[in-house]
Image (spheres, helix red, strand yellow):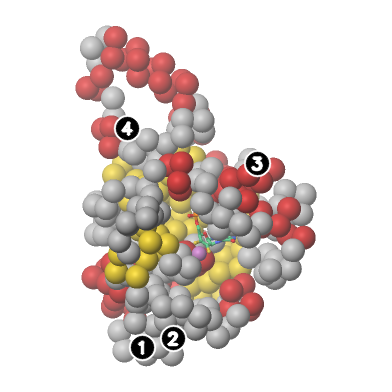
Amino acid sequence: MLIRIPTPHAPRPSEITPRTTYLTRRAALAGLGLAAAAPQVLAQTTPGGGRLARLPGQRSTAAGAVVLDKPTAYADATSYNNFYEFGTDKSDPAERAHTLKPRPWTVAVEGECARPGRYDLDTLLRLAPMEERVYRLRCVEGWSMVIPWVGYPLAELIRKAEPTGKARFVEFTSLADRAQMPGLRSGVLDWPYVEGLRMDEARHPLALLAFGMYGEVLPNQNGAPVRIVLPWKYGFKSAKSLVRIRFVEKQPRSSWEQSAPQEYGFYSNVNPHVAHPRWSQATERRIGEDGLFARKRPTLMFNGYEAQVGQLYAGMDLKKHF
Ligand SMILES: Nc1nc2c(c(=O)[nH]1)N[C@H]1C(S)=C(S)[C@@H](COP(=O)(O)O)O[C@H]1N2
Ligand SMILES: [Mo]
């Protein structure tokens, strides 16, 4: 089943304009003395690369949705990546992800829900208003970035799917296509890449379904055309290039848990008090600040989102549920 839900507020595919069109239009507006009429979101957005289609979003007003840290340069956020489907070196995704075809694209929504279906990308783009959210993202390896994402809460899609009372977890699956992803030939992980969340985590207002960053659609290496972003968890929980979202009764087994259960737990909340078995998690290196004299930053509980998400884990032993 192909679901089409037109809504008036979200961008039509035709509104996701190529950069050149947008620049020309802007110049035309300026020439008419109408520059002030250009949407405010454009002025707020940190510059992107200028080569991909525009995808603007209204600055989010949700609690914790916009951190004040300086956003990472677009060039850094798009050249230092983890996307093992394209190789394990940080530079592999930027060099090799051009073979990924982000259109046409569909995401299967299935499992314990009243309205399962296959959502095509254009339907997903129109499902809810696009917001811009500036999140810290911290990798379990000890580096972090600050990225202005464009998307809407995952809760919006969950609401449309109408999960049943049996749905206790959500499982996310990334694309696994050897023709598009050269890294699948290696056995570093069991493909496809799978991640999961408890239902209340998935419904948390900060859990984002992202389609863009820096006011443009996602570059392939950052998980085009649609990914999850969970700012309070280690980066690997934020699965890229999603093809399936499944509501399940039992806790999903993530690819990282599968590969090294003693190192990567299901929760994977950013926690400076729980060291990785092979290194401390107390500090982090902010990409772009890594000169010879750059100071390390202290890692914050729940990556600095404790006020917003701490309640989800009240009463849990976070050393056991790491
Ligand atoms: N499908 C898939 N999703 C993935 C990964 C991956 O290898 N494959 N790497 C994860 C890790 S380890 C991190 S730190 C983030 C990095 O996201 P970014 O490259 O957009 O900064 O993506 C996560 N999502
Ligand atoms: Mo990571």
Side of 85 relative to 49 (left or right): right
Q: Nearer the viewer, residue 70 or 179?
A: 70
Three-letter residue code for mark 4: Leu
Three-letter residue code for mark 1: Met
- Image spot of residue 145 (x, y percent): 39, 55
SS for callout 4: helix
Of the image marks 3 and 4, the number of the one nearer the N terminus: 4
- Badge 4 density bin: few <14, some 14–19, many ≥20, Cα 10 Å: some
Q: Tell me if label 4 and label 2 are in contact, CB under 8 Å.
A: no
Of the image marks 2 and 1, the number of the one nearer the N terminus: 1
Of the image marks 4 and 1, the number of the one nearer the N terminus: 4
Residue at mark 4 to residue at mark 2: CA–CA distance: 41 Å
- Image spot of residue 246 (x, y percent): 58, 67
- In the picture, which quadrant includes the C terminus? bottom left
Side of 160 relative to 272 (left or right): right
Whether the residue carrying mark 4 lies under 8 Å from ligand 1 is answered with no
Residue at mark 3 to residue at mark 1: CA–CA distance: 42 Å
Residue 321 numbered tag: 2
Which mark is nearer the camera, 3 or 1? 3
